[in-house]
Amino acid sequence: MCDGAKGREKLKDEVFLMMAIELSRLGTCCRLKVGCILLRPDGGIASGGYNGALPGMPHCTPQTCNPDQRCLHTSHAEENALGFCDGSVQTAYITDEPCLTCTRALIRRGVRRVVFLRPYKSIADQEKIERQAILEHFGVQWEHLELRPS
């Protein structure tokens, strides 16, 4: 039985978010593992990425990665995914809600829809206000998706 167009879109969201979750397993940050899948305007996969140390740099360790603070040792999943694709991207599926810097980078490349699994709980008020102003200015769809149990 076919799910129809609306059901198919929901299924795509779940599948691409699950792909981001799988990519996040490769993350090298001890505090938080993040994955990202980027789609081109035609709906094809443009790139994927996960958070981790720069190539050739040592990965996080419990001594270098404080679980109570933002990790400054790793590149973000969005940054890595954008670095490995050409052209514009339209949709981003990310395990964790993007920070302001990654939001700017995604929008700069054409992203107008962001789907994420976990909200960014420790975001500062000023960063949240600025991010919201940017999202509204560019008309970006910002969607928190909770995955249904399998």
Image: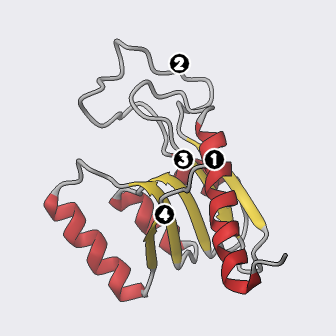
Q: Distance between the residues labelled 4 and 3?
A: 18 Å
Q: Mark 1: which amino acid?
A: Gly
64 sits left or right of 145 in the view: left
Q: Mark 4 points at which residue?
A: 145
The mark nearer the N terminus, 1 or 3, is 1
Q: Residues within 10 Å of mark 3 (few under 14, many from 20)?
A: many
In the rendered structure, are the residues bearing label 1 and label 3 in contact, judged by CB atoms less than 8 Å apart? yes
The mark nearer the N terminus, 4 or 1, is 1
- Eyeballing the image, is 84 above or below 51? below
Give the position of the N terminus as an image quadrant: bottom right
- Helix, strand or loop at mark 3: helix
- Helix, strand or loop at mark 2: loop
In the rendered structure, are the residues bearing label 3 and label 2 in contact, judged by CB atoms less than 8 Å apart? no
Q: Which mark is residue 49?
A: 1
Q: Name the residue under label 2.
A: 58
Report the label total. 4
Which mark's residue is nearer the viewer, 1 or 2?
Answer: 1
The mark nearer the N terminus, 3 or 2, is 2
Q: Nearer the viewer, residue 5 or 69?
A: 5
- Helix, strand or loop at mark 4: loop
Q: Mark 2: which amino acid?
A: Pro
The mark nearer the N terminus, 1 or 2, is 1
144 sits left or right of 126 in the view: right
Q: Which of 18 and 123 is in front in this view?
A: 18
Q: Name the residue under label 3.
A: 77
Q: How far apart are marks 1 and 3 (CA)?
A: 5 Å
Residue at horizontal 24%, vertical 29%? 68
Q: Nearer the viewer, residue 61 or 113?
A: 113
Q: Where is residue 127 in the image (x, y as percent from the top left)?
A: 22, 62
